[in-house]
Amino acid sequence: MPWRAHDEAVVQMRAAPINPADLNQIEGKYPVRFPLPATPGFEGAGVVVDAGGNGTTIPAGTLVILPHNLGTWREAVAVKASELVAVPPEIDPVHAALLKINPMTAWRLLHDYVDLKKGDWLIQNAANSAAGRAVTQIARELGHKTVNVIRRAELIDELRSEGGDVVLVDSEKLRDEVKSATNGAPIPLGLNAVGGESALRLANCLAPGSTLVTFGAMSLQPLKIPNGLLIFKGLRFRGIWINKWYDSASKEERMEAFRPLFEMAKRGLLKTKVEKAYPLTEAKAAVAHAAQGKRSGKIIFEFE
């Protein structure tokens, strides 16, 4: 077990996913760069095995979510007890390990940019991604309607079964298809995880004065905004990086945001699909698997 300082607890890892941000960091393409030698992993959950003697309210045996920028692909870690988030006992370690990045990003996307009312529409690309599915699940719980844009037609039925109100394949006909599917309802919020032409097709579906929030760039293509979308439609273009939100949020604000996610997870309404779990000893194979396209879910590390 690692040595700990007086204000730290020792956490034995139980699960840690491999996210695109992890792969980008390994490749040197991510803004957060740990000093080498470094341990990857922005997200994970584990059990407190040594709570320390600092008066922490999180006792040994508690399942916790680890703070970001820590490096979770390891068997155990010493971390400041005040930075741990205790997880309700109804949630298993794998689901807990997958709550911090994608579901929290989805929650912020649906709350921080547009005052959505029940029945309001939003549109998103990459709807089959982990973040996209979280958006759909949370939006459904909040009473919002979703237009879910994907690249592969074989995913349409699956995403509809998970609560997507409208599921469409991205194409040059997207604006007309969205208008038909929503009966011309105004769409005040667009969520872009792709960039490039896909993002512009989302923007063209939005009502005047609406907001497009970018939180990913899967296409690796820049978002070039036509002047008309700014001048004549008055669209707002925003961006979110969940790391920044965690850096600026107080402990109380973080816990307040986790509570509804925990409640949804306990009721089985917030789930991230897992395609395969690997032991840490097979890290090379796990990373290669995570880098492949057309997966059906997350690749994770599970620890005994």
Image (cartoon, grey):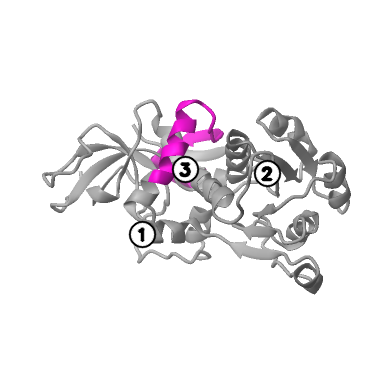
Q: Is residue 28 visible?
A: yes
Determine the residue positioned at 20% across, 40% down.
57
Residue 187, image x and y in percent? 74, 50
Range shown magenta: 256-285
Determine the residue positioned at 58% across, 45% down.
131
Q: Is residue 2 visible?
A: no
Residue 64, image x and y in percent? 32, 39
- Name the residue beneath numbered marker 1: 38
Q: Earlier in the sequence, mark 2 or mark 3?
A: 3
- Name the residue beneath numbered marker 2: 127
Q: Residue furthest left?
A: 53
Q: Earlier in the sequence, mark 3 or mark 1?
A: 3
Q: Residues within 10 Å of mark 1 (few under 14, many from 20)?
A: few
Determine the residue positioned at 13% across, 52% down.
6
Residue 228, image x and y in percent? 81, 71
Residue closer to the observer: 114 or 296 = 114
Q: CA distance from mark 3 to mark 1?
A: 17 Å
Q: CA distance from mark 2 to mark 3?
A: 19 Å
Residue 211, image x and y in percent? 67, 59
Tell me which amino acid carries mark 3: Pro
Please identify the quadrant where the N terminus is shown: top left
Q: Secondary structure at mark 3?
A: strand
Residue depth check, mark 2 versus mark 1: number of the one nearer the observer: 2
Q: Earlier in the sequence, mark 2 or mark 1?
A: 1
Residue 26 forms part of the magenta stretch? no
- Name the residue beneath numbered marker 3: 17
In the image, 168: left or right of 193? right
Tell me which amino acid carries mark 2: Ala
Q: Residues at badges 3 and 1 in contact (C-beta under 8 Å)?
A: no
Q: Residue 87 falls in which quadrant of the image?
A: top left
In the image, 18: left or right of 116? left
